[in-house]
Image (spheres, rainbow, N blue to C red):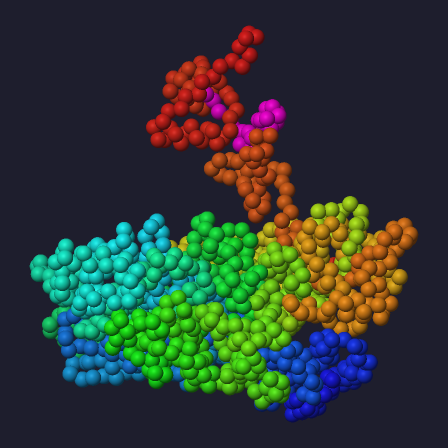
């Protein structure tokens, strides 16, 4: 999340192997962070990363 | 009118147009036209105030809203100047050429004041004072460290500085490196927002003097918006980049991710004489506080004799001995010094001289001897018994332990003698005239301790400990005579650096201030900043807590003090046990920071007051002679106090001395008091000279034009700060028309006697006072907007209103604290009438259609945090263990084992699956791991709003924060409240079709029962409705400012003009029958707040469920799915009624019934039909008893108390 605003760094699950977390980063580009690597966005240096929104269809109840 | 505001700031606006305006081009003309319509509107013959109000709205939006929006689209370089316009205090559309009426417009000073001082600025000021000066002074007072073993060794601190905040891993990158750290990153990553503190030292290494600069000794938490904070001086755009809200008050710390506020502490003032009487004893006490020491000294009068009392003296010393020891030579000198030439005082003091002949103490030597014998030794001299030198000990004690704040050199105790004599005199005077006993609750006798001072205490304590630790560790090395290499103290220096950091951080995180040196142990100093609503956070920053015990039943400290007028809010205090002990600052107050004494001392001398040490008692207490006290210590005398005071004030008004210096005359004691100390509450007042206000329309014009700032008003002597003591000495007119030739000051605005929270109430001066107090408590629970960055935050619990609205009836305070930008409530159309029976006892009827359209809708965000620990054996927690995707409860999970963002979780659905290694002991290798799903518990579904991953700063452990969201529409039982302490729960949500409607087809959103009015006497609420209704009809906001606001008569005229009844009552038609209602209904908009108490969080029921392990009784509380307790009183009812079987069922069968086998013969418990004691099964009988009773028997048994159960036949007689 760029340490600042809007484009949020996000991660998505990639390979389901056990100790591997794939990270996708939403500040323009996508980068992955593997197990053992520091939690930082490689593009903007932000240390706070967000998970990407699901691609699944979600339905909300409008009441 | 509004259009003409343009020339005021001609530059920024036209420049802004090309970029910003293009996208909103269609919007612009409409805005303009709106403005012009207002402009061309025929002016009604309204009083000036209402015109002002109309103007306010005309240009308010164009100035306050258009510019920030535009500024976002602009290049940063230009933003600054443009933003400056936004920072400007706003004067609500008053254009330059508008006539200025000083009587009406002097309140313009208030926004100018709030720009530089007030609200939370005192926190920031006090913290800045600590950072810039306080730390340096603390270090200066403890600057040299020496070794006990090597006299040559010396380390000296030459300077201390606080760098800018950075991350821990950025340490050592040099002070030129500016970190990109932001406060919000600290919140999200659970870090402490802190900055390195560096010192310059010089020390001896061998025979050299080594200098080292920029050695880090600690990290100190940084207060937000202080001058060290990255947010200082940033504009809106920069703030947005840093995910920070520009309206956030600042003034708090972020410690381990939590926002912590150091509440203002109220204390009795230091270094001042307070005369008290209790049980026939009259005493004058002083709490002396210096950097070195904090002690309390007393002069008491018991049975007509006076003594000096102090903790280090084993018994009370007759006052005459003390004065003799302090160097007053003759009895006559003492007598004159204490009693002056007043024969009544002399007579009552005379008896004290008898002690001299009794003890045969006639000279200073003997008096010192006498005192020296009574000095308690603080520490035993090491080793052999030392012969005490009483003389030296007495001098030591008198010079540095007793009244240490009074300056005294080893040889000259004159100042101290005068001080002690002055204390004695105060006691004698109070004995003769009991009205001279001081009032401890008088606000002028109080000092407020702000966060800077609290931090200073903390840092000082830890710094001293750091130095002693450092000394101990170098002593260990220096003790050894022969060393292999040259000793460099620097290697020992960095070892202890974490102690200060951790100590300060821990104190802030827990709120426990434990200072060894002052034997101070205070809990609850810090609180987590309440982010329920913007106003809750703001209210917390102005809160003052006093040190009084809550349990004590004295009404004095809780009562409203007349002296708190204008300083402390009269309405904002909690109900219940803390009532009157927790207070709030009023809107226009400032708390002073420490001012320099030295220039004031020079100034007093320059003004012709003579040094008091050069005078004897006769001249000090001569008729018409006044002593001049500087911070409670007599330093000079003058025979023309009035002239002295006037000259002094003149100097202050010219800005030659600090504007926070106060001076006043106390006629009772013939004293002129000058104060420069910290923690006094003060407020600005307009100076009046010769019956004329110094602030004239010319100056107000300049203020509006921006050529003058608030500071200029101070330096020109038009406005001055006045503290409580000085206020008591002034003659203050509230309105210009009330000024007489005796008037010295003019109030800026009367509504500033209320605080920020009470300021939200419209027409508070028409309400019954407790209602305002209730509203102050409820305003902090209202759900609304928290800040512009509310969606960037991950709080444990966050309530946000979906469609918050500005109140229709505003107050000046609302605008000044910018509540209208972060509101918490909605303007509901209210019909005051009875409707069905579901509105009794304050219940409200809600319109279902309004609820459907979003009335009272709110969102609840909750945080679930997971910490993935790293263990010592190299294994660590994980998340993405292979889980079964076919299990329904896992439907929301992604492959990483965390719920997908945007999915809905029902009850029992897994939020994440945590994977913990089975072996975590050091040395073992973990091969297996255990998957443990964490499920969503509550029955109401939540949506995953955000999932955030960060690493812990130090340990590198990952923290995953899952934010869940719920959108809630109002339901039966949700709590709502207007701004007048009128709370109620929703009793019925009625279909919109059934609601009554007026001839325009308007439905009410809320129907309120009229029975709420007569006993509550909240006339302000009715006036709010009227002003709101008039405002809605005329397209403007109403004003309900305290002691002002739109007048009912004018509102009635407006209503009439728009074809409504002047009384605010409308003709309504029943929505159910279609018939006209037989009465007119009071109908109009009232601002309603939704309070955080919602049924969904409280509703609870249970039939069967979990039981506590130990007692096997049902668990307690909603969180544990607990049972509903049949309590003592309910039990009493059943007993009284004789429902024994019901009682048995409730208390045993449905609770903790247990089958036990009891041996009839021995009365002990057996098992399986066998008695272990008797060794037989012959007499064993089975029976049911509460498990708790069985437990009691066994627990008593474990303590060697045998409990025998006697059995008998229930139906004996019948057998």
Foreground pick, B50 / A33: B50
In this orientation, does residue B1163 appear?
A: yes
The vertical placement of B916 against B398, above or below, is above
Q: Residue furthest right?
A: B1075
Q: Number of marks in the image? A: 0
Q: Is residue B800 left or right of residue B876?
A: right
Q: Is residue B324 left or right of residue B628?
A: left
Q: Quadrant of residue B1003?
A: bottom right
Q: For the point 27% across and 61% down, which residue is it?
A: B346
Q: Position of residue B200 (x, y in %)?
A: 30, 81
Q: For the point 46% across and 28% down, which residue is it?
A: B1190
The quadrant of the picture occupied by the N terminus of chain B is bottom right
Q: Is residue B1142 magenta?
A: yes
Q: Position of residue B419 (x, y in %)?
A: 28, 68
Q: Quadrant of residue B570?
A: bottom right
Q: Quadrant of residue B369?
A: bottom left
Q: Is residue B1 magenta?
A: no
Foreground pick, B805 / B1034: B1034
**Start-end of magenta stretch:** B1134-1158
Q: Position of residue B1119 (x, y in %)?
A: 57, 48
Q: For the point 44% across and 80% down, which residue is it?
A: B646
Q: For the point 34% across and 83% down, which residue is it?
A: B608
């Amino acid at each position: 999340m760029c340490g600042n605003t809007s484009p949020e760094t996000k991660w998505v699950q990639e390979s389901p192997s056990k100790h591997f977390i794939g990270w996708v980063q939403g500040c323009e580009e996508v980068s992955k962070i593997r197990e053992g690597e520091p939690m930082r966005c490689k593009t903007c240096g932000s240390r706070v990363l967000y998970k990407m929104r699901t691609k699944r269809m979600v339905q909300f109840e409008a009441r | 009118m509004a259009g003409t505001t343009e020339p005021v700031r001609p530059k920024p606006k036209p420049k802004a147009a090309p970029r910003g305006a293009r996208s909103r081009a269609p919007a612009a003309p409409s805005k303009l036209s709106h403005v012009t319509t207002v402009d061309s509107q025929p002016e009604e013959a309204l009083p000036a105030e209402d015109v002002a109000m109309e103007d306010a709205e005309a240009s308010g939006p164009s100035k306050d809203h258009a510019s920030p929006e535009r500024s976002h689209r602009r290049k940063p370089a230009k933003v600054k100047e443009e933003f400056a316009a936004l920072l400007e205090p706003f004067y609500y559309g008053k254009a330059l050429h508008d006539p200025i009426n000083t009587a009406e417009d002097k309140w313009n000073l208030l926004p100018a004041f709030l720009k530089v001082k007030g609200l939370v600025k005192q926190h920031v000021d006090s913290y800045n004072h600590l950072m810039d000066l306080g730390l340096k002074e603390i270090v200066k007072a403890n600057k040299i460290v020496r070794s006990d073993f090597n006299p040559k060794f010396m380390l000296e601190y030459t300077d201390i500085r606080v760098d800018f905040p950075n991350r821990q891993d950025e340490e050592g990158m040099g002070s030129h490196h500016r970190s990109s750290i932001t406060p919000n990153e600290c919140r999200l990553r659970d870090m402490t927002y802190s900055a390195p503190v560096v010192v310059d030292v010089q020390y001896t290494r061998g025979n050299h003097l080594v200098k080292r600069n920029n050695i880090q000794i600690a990290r100190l938490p940084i207060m937000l918006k202080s001058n060290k904070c990255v947010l200082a001086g940033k504009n809106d755009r920069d703030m947005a980049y840093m995910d920070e809200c520009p309206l956030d008050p600042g003034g708090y710390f972020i410690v381990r991710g939590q926002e912590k506020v150091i509440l203002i502490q109220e204390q009795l003032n230091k270094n001042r004489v307070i005369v008290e009487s209790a049980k026939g004893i009259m005493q004058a006490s002083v709490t002396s506080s210096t950097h070195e020491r904090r002690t309390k000294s007393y002069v008491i009068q018991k049975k007509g004799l006076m003594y000096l009392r102090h903790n280090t003296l084993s018994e009370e010393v007759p006052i005459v001995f003390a004065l003799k020891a302090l160097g007053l030579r003759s009895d006559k000198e003492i007598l004159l010094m204490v009693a002056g030439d007043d024969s009544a005082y002399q007579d009552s003091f005379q008896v004290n001289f008898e002690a001299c002949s009794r003890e045969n103490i006639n000279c200073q030597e003997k008096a010192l001897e006498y005192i020296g014998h009574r000095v308690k030794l603080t520490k035993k001299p090491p080793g052999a018994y030392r012969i005490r030198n009483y003389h030296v000990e007495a001098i030591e004690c008198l010079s540095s332990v007793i009244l240490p704040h009074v300056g005294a050199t080893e040889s000259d105790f004159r100042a101290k003698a005068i001080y002690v004599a002055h204390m004695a005199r105060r006691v004698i005077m109070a004995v003769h005239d009991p009205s001279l006993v001081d009032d401890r609750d008088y606000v002028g006798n109080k000092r407020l301790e702000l966060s800077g001072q609290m931090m200073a205490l903390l840092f000082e304590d830890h710094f001293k400990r750091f130095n002693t630790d450092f000394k101990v560790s170098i002593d260990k090395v220096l003790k050894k005579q022969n060393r292999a290499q040259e000793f460099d103290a620097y290697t020992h220096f960095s070892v202890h650096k974490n102690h200060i950091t951790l100590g300060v951080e821990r104190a802030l995180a827990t709120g426990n201030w434990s200072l060894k040196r002052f034997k101070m142990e205070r809990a609850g100093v810090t609180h987590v900043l309440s982010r329920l609503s913007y106003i809750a956070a703001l209210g917390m920053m102005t809160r003052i807590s006093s040190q009084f015990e809550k349990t004590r039943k004295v009404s004095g400290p809780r009562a409203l003090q007349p002296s708190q007028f204008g300083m402390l809010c009269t309405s904002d205090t909690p109900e219940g046990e803390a009532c009157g002990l927790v207070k709030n600052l009023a809107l226009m107050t400032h708390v002073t920071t420490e001012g320099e004494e030295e220039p004031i001392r020079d100034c007093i001398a320059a003004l012709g007051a003579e040094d008091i040490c050069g005078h004897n008692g006769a001249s000090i207490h001569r008729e018409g002679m006044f002593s001049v006290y500087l911070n409670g210590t007599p330093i000079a005398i003058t025979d023309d106090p009035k002239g002295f005071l006037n000259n002094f004030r003149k100097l202050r008004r010219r800005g030659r001395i600090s504007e926070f210096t106060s001076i006043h005359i106390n006629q009772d004691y013939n004293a002129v008091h000058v104060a420069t100390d910290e923690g006094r509450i003060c407020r600005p007042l307009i100076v009046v000279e010769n019956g004329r206000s110094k602030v004239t329309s010319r100056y107000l014009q300049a203020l509006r034009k921006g050529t003058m700032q608030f500071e200029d008003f101070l330096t020109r002597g038009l406005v001055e700060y006045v503290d409580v003591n000085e206020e008591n000495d002034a003659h203050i007119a509230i309105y210009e028309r009330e000024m007489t030739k005796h008037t010295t000051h003019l109030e800026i605005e009367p509504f500033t006697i209320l605080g920020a929270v009470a300021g939200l109430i419209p027409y508070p001066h028409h309400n019954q006072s407790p209602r305002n107090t209730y509203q102050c408590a409820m305003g902090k629970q209202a759900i609304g907007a928290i800040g512009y960055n509310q969606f960037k935050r991950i709080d444990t619990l966050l309530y946000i209103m979906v469609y918050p609205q500005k109140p229709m009836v505003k107050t000046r305070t609302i605008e000044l604290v910018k509540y209208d930008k972060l509101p918490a409530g909605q303007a509901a159309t209210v019909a005051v009438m009875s409707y069905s029976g579901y509105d009794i006892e304050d219940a409200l009827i809600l319109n279902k259609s309004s609820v459907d359209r979003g009335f009272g809708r709110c969102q609840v965000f909750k945080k679930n945090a997971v910490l993935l620990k790293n263990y010592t054996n190299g294994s660590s927690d994980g998340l993405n263990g292979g889980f079964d995707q076919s299990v329904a409860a896992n439907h929301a999970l992604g492959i990483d084992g965390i719920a997908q963002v945007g999915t809905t979780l029902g009850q029992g659905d897994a939020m994440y699956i945590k994977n913990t290694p089975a072996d975590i002991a050091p040395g073992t290798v973990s091969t297996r791991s255990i998957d443990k799903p964490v499920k969503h518990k509550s029955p109401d579904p939540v949506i995953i709003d955000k999932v955030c991953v960060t690493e812990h700063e130090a340990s590198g452990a990952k923290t995953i924060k899952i934010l869940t969201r719920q959108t809630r529409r109002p339901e039966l039982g949700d709590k709502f409240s207007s701004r007048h302490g009128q709370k109620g729960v929703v009793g019925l949500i009625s279909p919109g079709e059934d609601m009554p409607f007026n001839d325009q087809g308007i439905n009410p959103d809320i129907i309120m029962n009229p029975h709420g009015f007569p006993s509550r006497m909240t006339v302000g609420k009715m006036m709010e409705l009227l002003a709101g209704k008039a405002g809605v009809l005329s397209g403007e906001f109403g004003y309900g400012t305290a002691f002002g606001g739109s007048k009912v008569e004018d509102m009635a005229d407006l209503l009439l003009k728009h074809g409504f009844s002047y009384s605010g009552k409308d003709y309504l038609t029943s929505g159910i029958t279609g018939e006209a209602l037989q009465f007119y209904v009071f109908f109009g908009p009232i601002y309603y707040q939704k309070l955080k108490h919602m049924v969904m969080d409280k509703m609870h029921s249970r039939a069967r469920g979990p039981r506590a392990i130990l007692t096997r009784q049902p668990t307690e509380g909603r969180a544990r799915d607990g049972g509903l307790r049949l309590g003592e009183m309910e039990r009493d009812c059943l007993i009284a009624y004789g429902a024994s079987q019901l009682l048995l069922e409730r208390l045993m069968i449905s609770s903790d019934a247990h089958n036990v086998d009891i041996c009839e013969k021995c009365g002990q418990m057996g098992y399986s039909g066998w008695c272990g004691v008797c060794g037989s099964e012959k007499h064993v009988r089975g029976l049911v008893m509460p498990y708790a009773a069985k437990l009691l028997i066994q627990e008593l048994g474990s303590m060697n108390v045998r409990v025998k159960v006697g059995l008998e036949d229930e139906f004996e007689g019948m057998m």
